[in-house]
Image (spheres, rainbow, N blue to C red):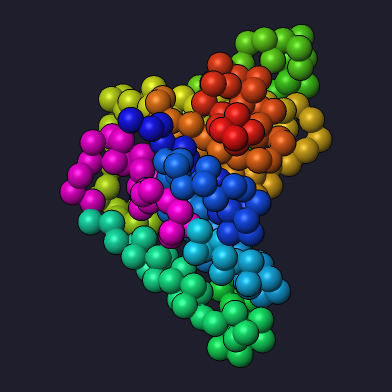
Amino acid sequence: MKKRIICDTMIWYNIGSNQYNRKIIDRLNLIATANTADELRMSGNILDKIGHVKLACQSFINDSESIIKYSPAEYMLILAGVTDHGFTGFDNILSKINRVIELPISELAMNSRINRDKIEKELMHYNSDLDKTVEFINSHKEYIRKHIKTSNGGVRKYRATSNDTGIRNLLIQLTELELKSLNKTLSIDWAKFPWGEIEFFLHIWYLHFLEIEVSHQKFKRNDWKDIMNMIYVRPNDLYWTEEKKWKRYIMCSPFKDQLFSYSNSI
């Protein structure tokens, strides 16, 4: 059986713009995610590069072997064994993607059937929610930075002793916040959660967080969407990204064999 290849958002743009050999793409077991669907339907490119978004959406639908239809928080709930959840949010996301696909390119280019003001308001609201999450994450980073400055040994000691426990705790807080917004009765028994299923995600987020928390960088909106797409990567999966930063982290991790290489498939 072919291994699943979880794809980040840029891969669908690249496939849509014919940057890869079609025969190779057709034989790969490419997996799309609700996280990338959300990025596509709320991309700022919709305003000025709608033709590119249309092609990426077409690739997302036509070139994926299957779609993981759960948001990252919903997926955590599925991994925890909760089946009676009633999630239907992806249907709304998919309908918006199909709406973009169905619009003629000539009309897309002119925005004649798209209310630009309405889209700008939707993007502003969407980005505002993301910014709240990013601000929450950065507040933790500032706390850690202050802790490093006041402790003996500084950055070197912190790098040697830090682990992904902090990332787990941060993920628990963020997941519970989202689950409450979806359904106040939903919960996860974290003591029984199968953390081994998302080790890839935890470690890459840890490496990135470690780098920014001891520097003068800040966690960014795009970082959050990129990182959360890795939560779908399970131990037997591969991950396909062309972004140098994420490839560097993966190659420096115990999970470098899970980085998909297009060049090795040619």
Q: Nearer the viewer, residue 102 or 148?
A: 102
Residue 23 vertical position relative to residue 244 in the rendered view, above or below: below
Q: Toward which corner of the image does residue 91 lie, by quadrant?
A: bottom left
Residue 41 vertical position relative to residue 263 in the rendered view, above or below: below
Numbered disc total: 0
Residue 247 vertical position relative to residue 45 in the rendered view, above or below: above
Residue 7 vertical position relative to residue 17 in the rendered view, above or below: above
Q: Residue at x 40, y 65 (%)?
A: 94
Q: Nearer the viewer, residue 243 or 19?
A: 19
**Quarter of the image that includes the N terminus:** top left
Q: Nearer the viewer, residue 216 or 58?
A: 58
Q: Is residue 15 visible?
A: yes
Going by the image, does 152 lie left or right of 259? right
Furthest-bottom residue in this view: 112
Q: Toward which corner of the image does residue 243 lie, by quadrant?
A: top right
Going by the image, does 2 lie left or right of 225? left
Q: Position of residue 257 (x, y in %)?
A: 54, 21
Furthest-right residue in this view: 216
Region of the chain picked out in magenta, as a range: 60-85
Q: Is residue 106 magenta?
A: no
**Quarter of the image that includes the C terminus:** top right
Q: Residue at x 49, y 64 (%)?
A: 58
Q: Position of residue 57 (x, y in %)?
A: 51, 63
Q: Position of residue 10 (x, y in %)?
A: 61, 51
Q: Is residue 64 magenta?
A: yes
Furthest-front residue in this view: 23
Q: Is residue 190 visible?
A: no
Q: Position of residue 130 (x, y in %)?
A: 58, 56
